[in-house]
């Protein structure tokens, strides 16, 4: 667990540190063994071999003395004899030097004992040797010869045997050193091989452990990255370590979680956009239906208003004509007071005029009745138009009131004309009463003139109201056109919104999460596969409205 929490750099440092320590241990072990081996070799070469070499040199000089001693017995030339004696002295000095050197270097007790025996034999040998030389110098060669074989030779052999014993002991020590050196070299070789193999095994284990703890998380990270790249966000990332690889896996886990949140948010947003697009489409359909109904109502209203405009114009013309006739009648009635005598003659004319007035009043009454019906239709259409037709309803109500007043006045005029006709018919029998009734006729004519003036004023007001209605219809038509354009824009925006939502759904459809649902993508793809139906659902209905000549002029 501790190793799993180490950073990669710390693992590498630790691993290479252990390997380096093991290499240092191998080097130290090898160095120590080589030092020991060098010590053994140095002991053999510089100590034991030198001692053997010194003893061999002493033996060689001892043998040289033996030859010199024999030579002085055989030679007759004094110079030669002296030369041989000098050689004996020289070799004796050499032996002395060698033995002195050995006495300072030998450490072994047995070697010291053997060296003591050698020196002791030499001490016994030298006087006998010198005595022989003295005999030869004195000329007693025969005695010297006999002394050589009887005295010198045995001492010389004892002396030589003592040195050979010391040499054999030193050679045994040298052989032991050789064995120890060989053993040391073999043990050093074996130990270095074992240590090297152990270091190699430990190094391989460390390398394997470090590699496994680095490569395994990297492979996991690569696998996770490939899974995320393929769009699968359902990977379960298990992070245990606290090193760089653990940090990498934790970062990948956090990235995977954030991607899941982002994809879910995008999908939820896409669902919301799809729902909103559907609602917009439904709203556009309802708005299109309402616009169609409004356009139909405006068409009917425009047609009714055109008829009402024609009727009101005719009513106004008749009212003007009636007004003129009423004025004429008033003038005739005024003159009648002065020309009562001519009443009988003009009675027929008055009767004819009365019949025309009756006809005109009938026309006015019919116009008032039609105006009343048109006002009722206008009120119904204004009620259908809702808030926008409130002003139109007020105008229609006023037109209706004026129509009712016109009808009432027409009825009254008709009643008065009927009475006038009856009086005209009875005029011929009531000539005597003409003077008295003329005043009443004048008053009636004045009253008719006033009523006709009211009718004319009402017609003018109806004309103004109709003009306002036409303006309202024009405004309603403009509003309808604007609504149609707005419906088209909303339809285009809704279609663009659905296209964007479909593209967004296609983009995030590659990601797989635990909450993946194909509802939004399928719905958007259905819409994209049937664009004509979608556009037909969004397309508004636009109706051309007929307009009156006065409305077109305005």
Image (cartoon, rainbow, N blue to C red):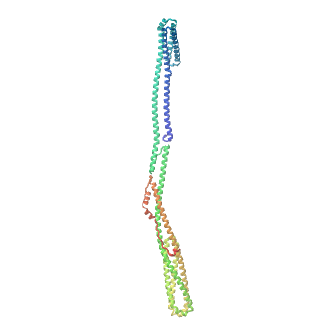
Question: Measured from the top left, where is residue 141 in percent x and y?
Answer: 49, 6
Depth check: 21 or 164 in front? 164
Residue ID at (49%, 47%): 251
* Figure label count: 0
Question: Measured from the top left, where is residue 85 in percent x and y?
Answer: 52, 11
Depth check: 385 or 166 in front? 166
Can residue 324 be seen from the camera position used here?
yes
Residue ID at (56%, 88%): 331
Question: Measured from the top left, where is residue 190 in percent x and y?
Answer: 45, 29
**Looking at the picture, does residue 435 appear above or below residue 212?**
below
Depth check: 401 or 133 in front? 133
**Looking at the picture, does residue 352 appear above or below residue 493?**
below
Can residue 469 be seen from the camera position used here?
no
Question: Measured from the top left, where is residue 72 in percent x and y?
Answer: 49, 9
**Looking at the picture, does residue 414 appear above or below residue 376?**
below
């Amino acid at each position: 667990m501790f190793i799993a929490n180490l950073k990669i750099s710390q693992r590498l440092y630790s691993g290479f540190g252990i390997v380096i320590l093991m290499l240092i241990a191998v080097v130290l072990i090898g160095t120590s063994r080589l030092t020991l081996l060098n010590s053994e070799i140095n002991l053999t070469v510089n100590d034991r071999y030198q001692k053997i070499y010194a003893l061999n040199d002493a033996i060689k000089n001892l043998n040289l003395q033996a030859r010199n001693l024999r030579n002085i017995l055989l030679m007759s030339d004094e110079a030669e004899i002296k030369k041989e004696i000098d050689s004996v002295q020289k070799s004796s000095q050499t032996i002395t030097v060698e033995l002195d050197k050995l006495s300072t270097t030998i450490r072994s007790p047995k070697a010291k004992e053997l060296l003591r025996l050698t020196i002791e034999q030499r001490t016994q040998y030298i006087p006998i040797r010198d005595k022989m030389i003295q005999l030869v110098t004195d000329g007693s060669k025969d005695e010297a010869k006999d002394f050589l074989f009887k005295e010198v030779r045995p001492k010389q052999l004892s002396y030589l045997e003592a040195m050979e014993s010391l040499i054999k002991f030193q050679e045994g020590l040298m052989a032991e050193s050789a064995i120890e050196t060989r053993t040391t070299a073999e043990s050093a070789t074996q130990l270095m091989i074992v240590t090297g193999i152990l270091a190699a095994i430990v190094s391989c284990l460390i390398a394997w452990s470090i590699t496994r703890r680095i490569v395994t998380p990297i492979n996991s990270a690569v696998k996770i990255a490939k899974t995320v790249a393929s769009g699968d966000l359902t990977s379960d990332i298990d992070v245990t370590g606290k090193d760089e690889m653990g940090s990498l896996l934790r970062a990948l886990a956090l990235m995977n979680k954030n991607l899941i949140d982002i994809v879910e948010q995008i999908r939820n947003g896409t669902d919301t956009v799809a729902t909103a697009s559907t609602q917009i489409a439904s709203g556009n359909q309802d708005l299109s239906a309402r616009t169609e109904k409004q356009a139909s109502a405006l068409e009917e209203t425009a047609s009714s208003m055109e008829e009402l405009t024609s009727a009101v114009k005719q009513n106004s013309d008749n009212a003007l004509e009636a007004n003129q006739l009423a004025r004429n009648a008033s003038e005739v009635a005024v003159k009648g007071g002065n020309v009562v005598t001519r009443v009988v003659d003009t009675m027929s004319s008055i009767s004819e005029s009365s019949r025309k007035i009756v006809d005109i009043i009938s026309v006015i009454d019919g116009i008032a009745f039609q105006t009343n019906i048109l006002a009722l239709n206008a009120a119904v259409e204004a009620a259908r138009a809702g808030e926008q037709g409130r002003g139109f309803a007020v105008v229609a109500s006023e037109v209706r009131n004026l129509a009712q007043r016109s009808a009432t006045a027409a009825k009254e005029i008709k009643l008065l004309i009927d009475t006038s006709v009856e009086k005209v018919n009875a005029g011929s029998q009531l000539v005597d009463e003409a003077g008295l009734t003329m005043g009443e006729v004048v008053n009636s004519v004045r009253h008719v003139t006033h009523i006709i003036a009211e009718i004319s004023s009402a017609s003018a007001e109806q004309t103004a109201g109709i003009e306002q209605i036409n303006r309202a219809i024009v405004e309603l038509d403009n509003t309808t056109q604007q609504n149609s354009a707005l419906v088209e824009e909303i339809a285009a925006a809704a279609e663009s919104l659905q296209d964007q939502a479909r593209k967004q759904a296609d983009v995030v459809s590659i990601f797989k999460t635990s909450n993946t649902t194909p509802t939004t993508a399928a719905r958007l793809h259905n819409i994209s596969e049937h664009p004509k139906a979608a556009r037909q659902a969004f397309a508004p209905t636009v109706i051309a409205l007929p307009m009156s000549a006065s409305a077109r002029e305005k």
